[in-house]
Amino acid sequence: MTSQDFSASKVPLGLGSGSRLAGYVLEEQIGAGGMAVVFRAQEERLGRTVALKVLAPALATDPGFRERFVRESRAAAAVDDPHIIPVFEAGEADGVLFIAMRFVRGGDVRSLVSRLGALPTERAMTIISQAASALDAAHRQGLVHRDVKPANMLLDASAGPDRDHVYLSDFGLSKAAMHATGLTGTGMFLGTVDYVSPEQIEGKPVDGRADQYSLACAAYEMLCGSPPFRREDAVALMWAQMHAAPTPLSMLRAGLPAGVDDVFARALAKPAADRYESCTRFAEAVRDAVGEHARGAPTTEAAGPPPGAGRLPTAPRPPTEVVPAAAGTAPAGQPPNRPRRAPVVLIGACILAAAGLVSGAILFRPHGHPAPAPSGSSTPPSTASSSTSSPQAGATGAKPKVQAHSSAPIAAPPSAGYHFAKVLYPGPSTKSITGVALSSAAPLIAASDKNGNTYLWNVGTGTPHGPVLSGPAGQAAYYTAFSPSGSVVASGFQDGSTSLWSAATGKLLARVHDPGSPTGKEVDSLAFSPDGHTLATADGNGNTTLWNVGPGTRVTRGASLADPAGAGVYSVAFASNGTLATGDYAGHVYLWDIASGTVTATFSVPGGSCSVSNICDAVSGLAFNDDGSVLAAGSINGNALLWSVSAKQAAAIPTASQGSPAIWGMSFGGAGTLAVASATGRLNVWNVSPGNLTATFAGSVTDPHSGSDGVGAVTVSADGRYLVSGDTNGSAYLWKLGGTGSAQT
């Protein structure tokens, strides 16, 4: 993206194929950008083919720009480096500014990466080194490129199929000249957002270290297939360039040694002073780090967390305004405070004041978040401030607060064996993640939030999949689930509706409403039956509605199961044999035979005296193990137990949430792995033995920035390899079992 778009008037009137300009015959348009178009042309005097760049008329009308353009184009042409595109001529003819340069056959690096994905390391090193040489040569002459990117790295096909010769182009279009003439808007910058340095965004003076940052972004893309930061929204992308830390490269590409992460952490440092002294020194450091692997150094798969991960730059903490929820016990018939009704966090800081951009809570992750915890970490990162623990919502009606994590963890539990793999950014969202799900088909991750959106990602790459799935306007999403085949994703909403979409295309397939809607209560939970033919939705009116899902995802309403205690239904889960479990606001769990609509078993999660009017112990988590023999249930008071379906016996899980007064979700994975999302911000993992109905604490991982209500949603893959968490600060995280490598499937 450039700061100004001249698309309506890029080409001067009368110019096109067959036209003549300053002794050049235009043959074919071969490129276009925000400021110019490029033609393949023949120079009549010498009979050679050139690339002729013609600037937009809006630029040519400014006398100061015309003068500086010609002067700086000639200065760039005088730089002596074999990897700067040779400039033959720059000038003005018939009121048109143009620059003639060598025509390079072979395309550019952007096209190469688009076609091949991540490049072989040796090829990437060759390109990076040649571009660095060109940049340093220009910097010695006082020139700063300001728009280094793969599209400006041209590949000369004449060098041979196995010998890349890189030319860096576009030095002649001085961005400083654009600023000097006032042709950019106030506070705007020129450059491409995927590669632009923080100081350019802020409008600060720049030097060669800004080009180094951009080169590092381009090098990162060559090595893993995508730039360091991927956001759908340009403002969010600029915020990430200024404040966020990229995912360590060694986690994204198997075989890259841990030392590579240190190199990129330095070259992508937010303060320019922290970067390498030159682009060539950066290129040498990358080559040295990659060379460690060639000499037999262990990769991160074998060696554990990369040494540089803990030194990645962290995001500052802009001020936030907290609007707490009301104190006291929830009214009768309403669920208690919980992540789905967490206090609203309003972002009051101006995101990019120096860049002339408006403030707003739109940045995929709230501004109050520091950078994510480094790979392998089980404790939150240190922040600039600390506070004492505040009461957690959902326990006694205490007023919840957003608290800053201190540098010390609440406790020091053992690692559960899961290591941080990726941060997933589900939206422009400052609201709680209310549901997460894993599909075994693609495989895909789904997460819903209180903005009413559901987002999909590919597990293997951590990249977004398809469009954002939006529910009814103004209605928060409260839960999400995949069908067993993975072809359908469903989310339940605040207005009592449920939407079903195609996971492949994002097309809305059906939208249904629970009984009592639109005056009814929200859909708190939903689940597909093992055969995918039934969808159960639970609402605050006390109904669990069974929907028949037919061919073409035609959905019709079936039976409605009324909660025997008359309480709202908070959670539902299907066993592999089709048994349905429901948990209500009053701490009761019921097992149903859905064919007859009858209750086959019932038990309560311990938590003291409960009644429908108090709603003191809502069942906030339900999960069956893989063979359906054990049901785990947890409550907002932090109590949890295991229920033997055949023996109809219960066994408590001691201190299941490890000190938290609230459990917000549970999920079984393979081999008896049970993950519990807690209000402490921890994901606690248990190994469950169905035979003797015991749970052994395996350890925990800590959400880096979970918010005052902790981790609100969790799911474990069927094979137990992956864990996905969603927190009450609006972030979702992917965790991988047994290492720090990327989440390959």
Image (tube, grey):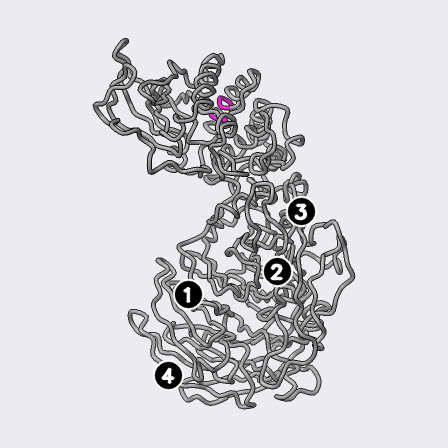
Q: Is residue 652 visible?
A: yes
Pointer 4 or 3: first along the chain: 3
- Where residue 57 appears, x then y in whole percent? 36, 29
Pointer 1 or 4: first along the chain: 1
Count of numbered marks: 4
Name the residue rendered at 70%, 65% in the picture: 401
For badge 2, the amino acid type reads Leu
- Where residue 128 appears, x then y in whole percent? 50, 26
Distance from label 1 to label 4 (Cα)?
20 Å
Front residue (pair 181, 233): 181
Q: Residue furthest top?
A: 46
Q: Which residue is mark 1?
A: 489
Distance from label 4 to label 2 (Cα)?
41 Å
Whether the residues at callouts 2 and 1 have beta carbons within 8 Å, the answer is no
- Where residue 473 appears, x then y in whole percent? 44, 67
Q: Is residue 578 above or below residue 201?
A: below
Task: Indicate which disc residue 504 carries.
Answer: none
- Which image quadrant for residue 58? top left
Q: Is residue 487 above or below residue 567?
A: above
For badge 4, the amino acid type reads Gly
Q: Which residue is mark 3?
A: 316
Q: Which residues are magenta?
A: 127-131
Front residue (pair 50, 20): 20
Whether the residues at callouts 1 and 4 have beta carbons within 8 Å, the answer is no
Q: Which residue is mark 4?
A: 558
Distance from label 2 to label 3 (Cα)?
17 Å
